[in-house]
Image (cartoon, rainbow, N blue to C red):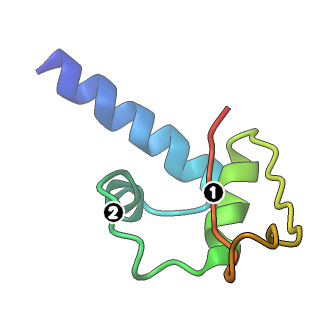
Amino acid sequence: MRVEHAAHGAKMAAATLMGLDQPKVSHLLRGRLGGFSTQRLLECLTALGRDVEIVVRPAPKSRKRGRMHIAAA
């Protein structure tokens, strides 16, 4: 039970920082992002002390289309 209480406490702390309720934090942790805009997700990351950088550059001529790459450091 202690682990569950600790996890619940961490979710509540994260919820407070991000301005969300605990059920929405649970949705985020489970990858259920349908109810969140891109803007809101980025705001959550910055509220948690993360810098967000989006870089857009031309694709190489060897590819017809661009691609997306997301990395966490």
In the image, taking residue 24 as reference, residue 40 lies left or right, namely right
> Tag 1, which secondary structure?
loop
Q: Which label sits on residue 27?
A: 2
Q: Left or right: where does residue 23 sit relative to residue 33?
A: left
Classed neighbour count for the residue bearing mark 1: other residues with Cα under 10 Å, few (<14), some (14–19), many (≥20) = few
Placement of the N terminus among the 4 image quadrants: top left
Q: Quadrant of residue 40?
A: bottom right
Q: Find residue 14 and report its horizontal and vertical position in percent.
A: 53, 43
The residue under label 1 is which amino acid type? Answer: His
Extreme top residue here? 2
Give me the residue at 67% from left, 81% from top.
65
Image quarter where the C terminus lies is: top right
- Residue flagged by tag 2: what amino acid is it? His
Q: Are marks 2 and 1 in contact (CB under 8 Å)?
A: no
Q: Earlier in the sequence, mark 2 or mark 1?
A: 2
Q: Name above or below for residue 41 compared with residue 29.
A: below
Residue shown at 51%/51% (left/top)? 15
- Relative to the observer, which residue lies in front, 49 or 52? 52
Which quadrant holds residue 50? top right
Name the residue rendered at 32%, 55% in the picture.
Answer: 26
Question: Which residue is denoted by mark 1 in the rendering?
Answer: 69
Q: In this view, does 34 lie above or below 3?
A: below
| Residue 22: x %, y % from top left | 38, 56
Residue occupying the point 44% across, 43% down: 12
Q: Distance between the residues labelled 2 and 1?
A: 23 Å
Percent position (x, y) of residue 46?
A: 76, 51
Depth check, mark 2 against mark 1: the one in front is 1
Q: What element carries label 2?
A: helix
